[in-house]
Image (cartoon, helix red, strand yellow):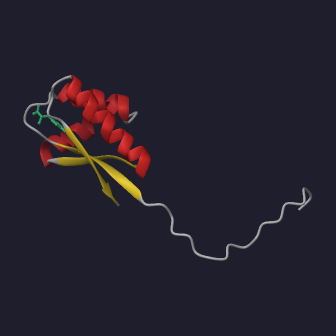
Amino acid sequence: NREGVVLEPQKTWVKPPPLFKVVLLNDDYTPMDFVVTVLQTIFFMSREQATQIMLKVHREGSGVCGVYPRDVAATKVEQVMAFARQHQHPLRCVMEET
Ligand code: TYC
């Protein structure tokens, strides 16, 4: 093109990086409001969306909070676990390859 940039055709198929679901798990003790706050602050959900996901986890046992590349998913899990620990709630969160 005009800037002299040449786009080489890709020679070999590069596997796209894997994505990971961040899954929140139900328990009998963590207050519902605390879970809603976690979803709003760590996953940037609206209060309405956070409430829907929290209720889904409460009723079904688990629920997906988001899908991210490995390092982002791992950081989200750490943030949820650290926040829960600070407040002495047994809330758990795991990552699962899609
Ligand atoms: N089951 C909890 C309660 O009745 C609420 C809750 C929802 C806990 C979602 C964890 O991931 C969770 N207080």
Which residue is more in the foreground, 46 or 83? 83
Residue 44's x, y, as percent? 40, 33
The answer to whether residue 55 is above or below residue 89 is: below
Give left or right: position of 54 versus 72: left
Q: Quadrant of the C terminus?
A: bottom left
Quadrant of the picture in which ligand 1 is shown = top left
The answer to whether residue 64 is above or below residue 49 is: below
Which residue is more in the foreground, 39 or 94? 94
Indicate the quadrant where residue 31 lies. top left
Q: Is residue 57 visible?
A: yes
Residue 60's x, y, as percent? 14, 49
* Residue sticking out furthest to the right: 2
Q: Is residue 69 visible?
A: no
Indicate the quadrant where residue 50 lies. top left
Give left or right: position of 97 versus 24: right
* Residue sticking out furthest to the left: 28
The answer to whether residue 84 is above or below residue 20 is: above
Q: Quadrant of the N terminus?
A: bottom right
Tell me the residue at 33%/59% (across/down).
97
Tell me the residue at 15%/25% (across/down).
88
Residue 91's x, y, as percent? 18, 35
Numbered-mark total? 0
Residue 22's x, y, as percent? 32, 47
Tell me the residue at 90%/60% (across/down).
4
